[in-house]
Image: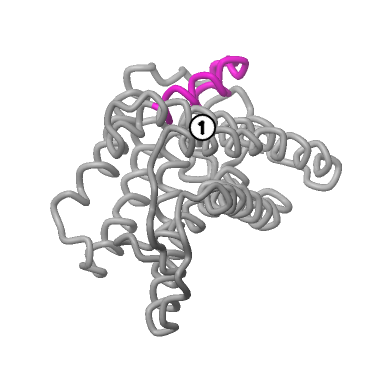
Amino acid sequence: MKKKTPLALWLIGFILLSLYINLIPRFFDAGNVPLWFAYWAGFFVLAFMVSRFLLQLQGLKQLGMARHKGWLLHLGIGFLVGFLVYALKYLAFYELGKFEVAGLMEPGFILPMLGQALLAMFFSSILNDITIRGYWFAYFKRRQLLAWYVFAATILYTLDDFWNEGLDPLNFVFSAILGAAFAYTVLKTGAIWISLGLHWGGNMMYRVMYGFDGNGVWQLENVQEGPLYDYISLGVTVLMLPAVYFILKSSEKHAPTPELRVEEGQVV
């Protein structure tokens, strides 16, 4: 059996990936498309190097990207569930008067915005899923500590949101709900695909509503804020937990998943 990689090296690799994701975009303009592609590509290069040379693994597939039978279906199902849960949340907002809809934006605005959102939300989601859920699933699997995986991945995801939202207790709860749903799918499937779909679909629906500058598909007017809408957001988001549970239960017999051996650097 190969000697286990020390926890210190796992922490170093995680810090490198997390700093890359959260700090690099702060140094270039949000509208610079070539730099965004370079940034995304650079992450996969860094993640491969961390996996292969720092952790002595076999590359990205051991950071949750193993393409098991049905992985594309898992990705699609996750996207649909994430998209619909967020759509239900915004429908509840509309019915409860959070905003009024004055009409649709022009097609010349909608189509490019949605295309940009599909691409940008995919990469923002997969970078997070690899760094938090795929990365630490590999660690907890090898240390035979999977009983702690969902808890640990949820805490890490919640803390990671500090980069974007700051110290907001309600947002911590919201992130914890999402993080638990995401991590549970990785625990049950051994890969990030359903989690990535959930993440991508929810982010995509957010962009449908608000775009990148507050302007989404619909023209929103008289937008209200208040605790009621925060609690509605939490209540609807909780539905993602039973949704993924029943989907995974119903699909277990149709989608065999990869099994990572305890020995590091092995995958079957």
Q: Which residues are magenta?
A: 139-158
Q: Position of residue 253 (x, y in %)?
A: 86, 42
Q: Position of residue 257 (x, y in %)?
A: 72, 41
> Is 168 placed above or below 45 here?
above
Q: Residues within 10 Å of mark 1 (few under 14, many from 20)?
A: few
Residue 5 image point, x, y percent: 41, 21
Question: Which residue occupies 63% across, 27% down?
Answer: 261
User: In this view of the protein, which residue sits in the foreground, 182 or 171?
Assistant: 171
Residue sitting farthest toward the left: 27
Q: Quick check: 117 left or right of 162? A: right
Quarter holding the N terminus is top right
Residue named by callout 1: 231
- Observer-nearest of 191 and 210: 210
Q: Residue furthest bottom?
A: 108
Helix, strand or loop under label 1: helix
What's the magenta bit mostly, secondary-structure-wise?
helix
Q: Is residue 140 magenta?
A: yes
Residue 74 sits inside the magenta stretch? no
* 236 is higher (above) or lower (below) than 14: below
**124 or 207: nearer the viewer:** 207
The image's colour scheme reads one colour
